[in-house]
Image: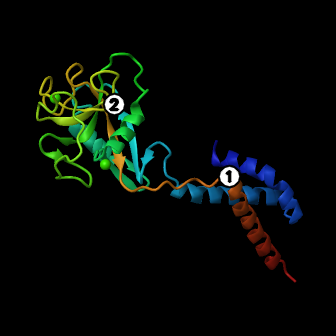
C-alpha cells in the first residue's frame, strides 16, 4: 500500500473528526491527506527494515546467493564485502560472528525449514577462519571462544561455514577445503555453501507508528493551515 493509499484510508476514518472541528470541504480533505503523507514520510525516515531477525539487540539475516558455485559469486571474500555493504537500522553488517550456543541457535533458526529437500548438505559463511579466529565484526582478531565444529572439523585450515541443510550435522560448523577454486570458494559437493549470514550490531527495532496514530499529524496540519487562513483574512 502506498503512502497516498494509506492516507486516503486514514482520511476516510477522520472525516467525522474533521466535521466536528469544522474542517470540511474539498480543501480540508486534501490538506489532511498532505499532512498525513508528511507524517508518514517523517516516520519512514526512522523506520528500520523488517527483514532481519533480532537476537538481543543485534539483527541477523541469511542471504542466499544465486549461482553460488560460479566464479567468485559466493567466495568468502565476496560474501564478506556484500555483508559489509548491507545497512540495517543505520548499522553496516558483517558476516556473522557466533559467540554462544544461543546465537548459534538463533542463526540456525533463520534457515531451519528453509531447505526442505531431504539429505541436502548446504552451508552459509560465517565471519571466521581456522586457526585465525574471527576476521570481522567486534570480535575481529579474537580466536574462537565458543565453537560448534561438527565431526572431524576443523580439518582444512579454511573459512568457517555453518551446515544449514538437512544432513551433515545441521547447525554445526565446517571449514572449507581447497577443492575446486581453492580456499574461500565453495564447492557444490565438498563445501556446498549457498549463502551467508549477516549480523548488524546494536540495532534496536523502531516500529513504524500505526496508521491510526498518524491521524493527529494530518489533523494538526489542517489545524495549522486553518489558523493561518483565519489570520490571513483582512479585517
Ligand atoms: Ca555475533
Ligand atoms: Ca573441513
Side of 201 where 22 appears, left or right: right
Residue 65 disc label: 2
Seen in the picture, residue 202 relative to 153 is either above or below; the reply is below
The residue to which callout 1 is attached is 211
Q: Which sits in the foreground, 99 or 84?
A: 99
Image region (quadrant) for ligand 2? top left
- Can residue 24 be seen in the rendering of this structure? no
**Pointer 1 local density, CA inside 10 Å: few below 14, some 14–19, many at least 20:** some
Task: Give the residue at x 28% y 26%.
Answer: 169
Seen in the picture, residue 154 relative to 33 is either above or below; the reply is above
Residue 101 disc label: none
Task: Give the residue at x 33% y 29%.
Answer: 164
Seen in the picture, residue 7 relative to 78 is either above or below; the reply is below
Residue 149, horizontal then vertical, whole percent: 21, 34
Kindly indicate the quadrant of the structure image that contains residue 161.
top left
Side of 12 where 210 appears, left or right: left
Task: Give the residue at x 71% y 51%.
Answer: 7
Task: Give the residue at x 64% y 49%.
Answer: 3
Seen in the picture, residue 153 relative to 198 is either above or below; the reply is above
Identify the element where label 2 is drawn: loop
Identify the element where label 1 is drawn: helix
**Pointer 2 local density, CA inside 10 Å: few below 14, some 14–19, many at least 20:** some
Kindly indicate the quadrant of the structure image that contains residue 232.
bottom right
Side of 144 where 208 appears, left or right: right
Q: How far is the residue under mark 2 from the one under mark 1? A: 35 Å
Amino acid at each position: 500500500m502506498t503512502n497516498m493509499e494509506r492516507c486516503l484510508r486514514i482520511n476516510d476514518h477522520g472525516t467525522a473528526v474533521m466535521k466536528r472541528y469544522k474542517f470540511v470541504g474539498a480543501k480540508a480533505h486534501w490538506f489532511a491527506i498532505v499532512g498525513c503523507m508528511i507524517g508518514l514520510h517523517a516516520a519512514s525516515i526512522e523506520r528500520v527494515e523488517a527483514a532481519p531477525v533480532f537476537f538481543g539487540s543485534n539483527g541477523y539475516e541469511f542471504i542466499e546467493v544465486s549461482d553460488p558455485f560460479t566464479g567468485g559469486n559466493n567466495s568468502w571474500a565476496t560474501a564478506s564485502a556484500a555483508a559489509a555493504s548491507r545497512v540495517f537500522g543505520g548499522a553496516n553488517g558483517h558476516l556473522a560472528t557466533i559467540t554462544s550456543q544461543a546465537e548459534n541457535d538463533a542463526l540456525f533458526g533463520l534457515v531451519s525449514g528453509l531447505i526442505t529437500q531431504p539429505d541436502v548438505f548446504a552451508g552459509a559463511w560465517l565471519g571466521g577462519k581456522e586457526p585465525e579466529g574471527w576476521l570481522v565484526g567486534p570480535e575481529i582478531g579474537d580466536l574462537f571462544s565458543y565453537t560448534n565444529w561438527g565431526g572431524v572439523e576443523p580439518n582444512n585450515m579454511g573459512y568457517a561455514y555453518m551446515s544449514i541443510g538437512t544432513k551433515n550435522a545441521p547447525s554445526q560448523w565446517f571449514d572449507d577445503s581447497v577443492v575446486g577454486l581453492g580456499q574461500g570458494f565453495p564447492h557444490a559437493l565438498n563445501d556446498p555453501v549457498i549463502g551467508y549470514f549477516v549480523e548488524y550490531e546494536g540495532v534496536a527495532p523502531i516500529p513504524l507508528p500505526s496508521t491510526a496514530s498518524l491521524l493527529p499529524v494530518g489533523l494538526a496540519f489542517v489545524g495549522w493551515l486553518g489558523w493561518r487562513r483565519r489570520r490571513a483574512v483582512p479585517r
